[in-house]
Amino acid sequence: MNGQAVEETAGGGGGAGEGGTEGGSPADGGSPTEAEAEAEVGTETGTGTGTGAGTGRDAILRAARRAFAFRPYAEVTLRGIAADAGVSASLIVKHFSTKERLFNTVADFGPAADQLFAAPLDGLGRHLVLTMVRSRREQQGDPLLRVVFALGNDDERVLLRERFDEQITRRLTALLTGPERALRAELVVGLLLGLGVTLSLHREGANARATPEHLAAVYGPALQRLISA
């Protein structure tokens, strides 16, 4: 694809909803700083080569999560994401075609839910902590925390919160048994988000020296009590 076509794709595109948006406003009370956003959704950039967490596609997704968390949709460009990811804008077009499709991929919590909930209920608390911690350490990013920055009235941010509720909270609600399933699911999700924030705030703290298994042994029982109630 030639440079002009990439520029048009990077600069154009509507919102994730029908008709898109022409701009965006920061959340009430102010936006998070870029450093805060990076701390929550991942800070590593990729080179566009190799395998695993350093592949071009994964680097693009990490950069896109940062971009969409920190800036209104209309201000995000594929060229900016490419520069942050250390890849070419044409590689983003190859993988995702348009900014709208890239946003929809970022807003999809389904793959994270598949990993988080892939355990029997009687061991789900431990599994949730293990999955969260290993994902952060291996992928240099949190699978859920981008929803914390989706505070505001922009259509795209509303969509992000709605997807999170549908794919994470309500899916967990459907898995649980017993009374007050919806309430318990919301509290479990809150504990998971709290874990992610704590790990981000104390990157050089005691948690960084603890194994995922030890963190699961310490934190998992609180989740399991809600799951098994």
Image: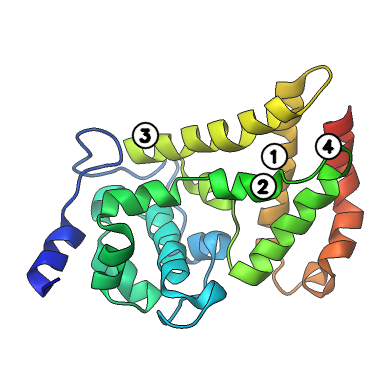
Residue 121's disc is 4
Residue, disc 1: 190
Residue ID at (22%, 40%):
21
User: Farthest residue in the left direction?
Assistant: 4
Element type where label 4 sits in the image: helix
Could you tell me how far apart the alpha carbons at marks 3 and 4 are, in whole angstroms?
36 Å
Q: Residues within 10 Å of mark 1 (few under 14, many from 20)?
A: some
Whether tag 2 and tag 4 are in contact, CB under 8 A, the answer is: no
Residue, disc 3: 153
Residue, disc 2: 193
Q: Position of residue 212 (x, y in %)?
A: 81, 65
Sequence-wise, the earlier of marks 3 and 4 is 4
Q: Position of residue 151 (x, y in %)?
A: 46, 40
Callout 2 amino acid:
Leu
Q: Quadrant of residue 99?
A: bottom left
Q: Residues within 10 Å of mark 4 (few under 14, many from 20)?
A: some
User: Farthest residue in the top direction?
Assistant: 179
